[in-house]
Amino acid sequence: MNAERDDAAIAARLLADAVHTVAAIARDAGLSLDGYLVLHEAVAAGGIRPTVLGRLLGRSSGSLTPVLDRLAELDLAHRVTNPEDRRSSLVVATDAGAKIVADARERQSVALRMMTSALPLDVRRALIAEDEG
């Protein structure tokens, strides 16, 4: 039972550290957390509909309008006509937006290595196995 409690405490700490890292990345880029998450999803998808973003982030597409406006104002992402359905739009990251996400991924990777370096070897192996599986 203690081992399970220790594993749960480790997992909770890793999750809290990961959230803190993402929040710091967003702040450093001059973005809200939602702004960074939208930008991240736009880069990952190569373009994504606002309604899909809303579902992924648990927000209405209307509540994302100010976030999308801010990303456009900063020249980090733009709305473009969806080539598959001209009635809808896609959110597409600019090169500057993609660079922020790439830099953030590197920063997250470094932070994750630092966070997990203190874990016992068997726990690190289990995390790697989960990631690969």
Image: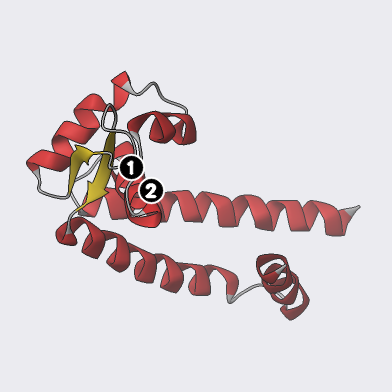
Occupied quadrant, residue 53: top left
The spot of residue 120 in percent (x, y) is 72, 76
Question: Looking at the image, which residue is at 47% across and 28% down?
Answer: 58
Question: Looking at the image, which residue is at 20% across and 38% down?
Answer: 79
Residue lying farthest right? 1
Q: Nearer the viewer, residue 61 or 83?
A: 83
| Circle 1/circle 2 CB separation < 8 Å | yes
Occupied quadrant, residue 10: bottom right
Disc 1 residue crowd, few under 14, some 14–19, many 20+, Cα 10 Å:
many
Occupied quadrant, residue 60: top left
The spot of residue 89 in percent (x, y) is 26, 34
Amino acid type, callout 1: Val
Residue lying farthest bottom? 121
The spot of residue 1 in percent (x, y) is 91, 52
Amino acid type, callout 2: Glu
Question: Looking at the image, which residue is at 33% across and 42% down?
Answer: 38
**Image check: 102 left or right of 110?**
left
Rendered position, 81 above or below 64? below
Rendered position, 15 above or below 123? above
* Quadrant in which the C terminus appears: bottom right
Element assignment for label 2: helix
Disc 2 residue crowd, few under 14, some 14–19, many 20+, Cα 10 Å:
many
**Image check: 1 left or right of 26?**
right
Element assignment for label 1: helix
**Image check: 15 left or right of 32?**
right
Q: Nearer the viewer, residue 81 or 103?
A: 81
The residue pinned by badge 2 equals: 41
Question: Looking at the image, which residue is at 61% across and 74% down?
Answer: 118
For the residues labelled 1 and 2, the Cα–Cα distance comes to 5 Å
The spot of residue 59 in percent (x, y) is 41, 25
The residue pinned by badge 1 equals: 38
Rendered position, 18 above or below 57? below
